[in-house]
Image: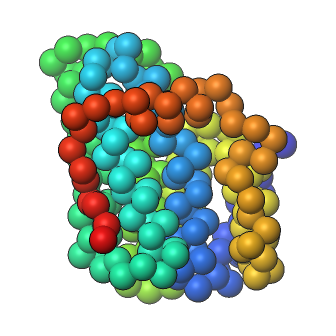
């Protein structure tokens, strides 16, 4: 059953910025490993994209944990996520590759990550909620398994129950999530992007 996006938006309006960051960080973290599916079509660049997007999510979650992350850093993070989307488009133009479904998934993942950073750095609560909703709906577009989990997260966070969130995938990680995460951790020679501390 698809989530009730209106209920989610109402829940998000009640959240302080650090808690909103937890919501969007979890939304983006759930879909970032999908990028590894692009490696057969786009080559090793896909693992680099995965590395960058994972770094952006870590910055958003660092803000959620109360670490000193500035709006400048969050702006760079959002730009990096959009840069990954642009790099993918440019590679497609020169090299080709990827099914329409895969390309749309990757675009949705990049959008979810960029909007997550935008939500955290937004200049007003209203803008933050709008960006958070865009992050959430983009994550759901990338993987429809995510929507119901986001609805659950939003309800818990609005009720002040952040400690009850638990694992990203309460019923167990999908195979693609585990494989993408393992691919990222197994990669060598990737640059540190947006390293904190």
Q: Quadrant of residue 15?
A: bottom right
Percent position of residue 75, x then y: 27, 68
Image quadrant occupied by the N terminus: top right
Residue 114 shows in the view: no
Q: Nearer the viewer, residue 100 or 184?
A: 184
Tell whether 134 sits left or right of 191. Answer: right
Tell whether 44 sits left or right of 98. Answer: left
Q: Nearer the viewer, residue 2 or 53?
A: 53
Residue 72 shows in the view: yes
Taking the view exactly as shown, the residue that stands out farthest to the right is: 1
At 43% from the left and 59% from the top, the residue drawn is 58
Image quadrant occupied by the C terminus: bottom left
Percent position of residue 55, x then y: 36, 53
Q: Nearer the viewer, residue 22 or 86?
A: 22
At 54% from the left and 26% from the top, the residue drawn is 179
Q: How many marks?
A: 0
Q: Quadrant of residue 74?
A: bottom left
Percent position of residue 12, x then y: 65, 75
Percent position of residue 79, x then y: 25, 57
Q: Is residue 116 above or below residue 181?
A: below
Q: Is residue 152 above or below residue 51?
A: below
Colour pattern: rainbow
Q: Is residue 81 above or below residue 68?
A: above
Q: Quadrant of residue 175?
A: top right
Q: Is residue 136 above or below residue 107?
A: below
At 52% from the left and 75% from the top, the residue drawn is 65
At 24% from the left and 38% from the top, the residue drawn is 190
Tell whether 13 sits left or right of 117. Answer: right
């Amino acid at each position: 059953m698809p989530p009730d996006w209106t209920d989610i938006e109402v829940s998000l309006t009640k959240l302080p910025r650090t808690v909103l960051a937890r919501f969007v960080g979890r939304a983006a973290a759930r879909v970032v490993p999908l990028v590894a599916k692009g490696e057969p079509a786009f080559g090793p660049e896909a693992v680099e994209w995965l590395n960058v997007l994972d770094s952006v999510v870590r910055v958003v979650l660092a803000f959620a944990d109360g670490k000193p992350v500035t709006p400048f850093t969050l702006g760079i993070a959002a730009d990096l996520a959009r840069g990954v989307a642009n790099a993918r488009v440019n590679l497609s133009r020169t090299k080709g590759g990827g099914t329409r479904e895969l390309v749309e998934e990757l675009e949705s993942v990049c959008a979810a990550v960029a909007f997550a950073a935008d939500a955290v750095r937004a200049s007003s609560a209203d803008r933050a909620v709008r960006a958070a909703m865009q992050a959430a709906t983009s994550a759901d577009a990338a993987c429809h398994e995510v929507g119901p989990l986001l609805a659950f997260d939003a309800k818990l966070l609005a009720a002040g129950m952040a400690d009850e969130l638990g694992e990203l995938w309460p019923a167990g990680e999908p195979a693609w999530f585990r494989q993408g995460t393992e691919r990222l951790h197994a990669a060598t020679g990737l640059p540190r992007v947006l390293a904190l501390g």
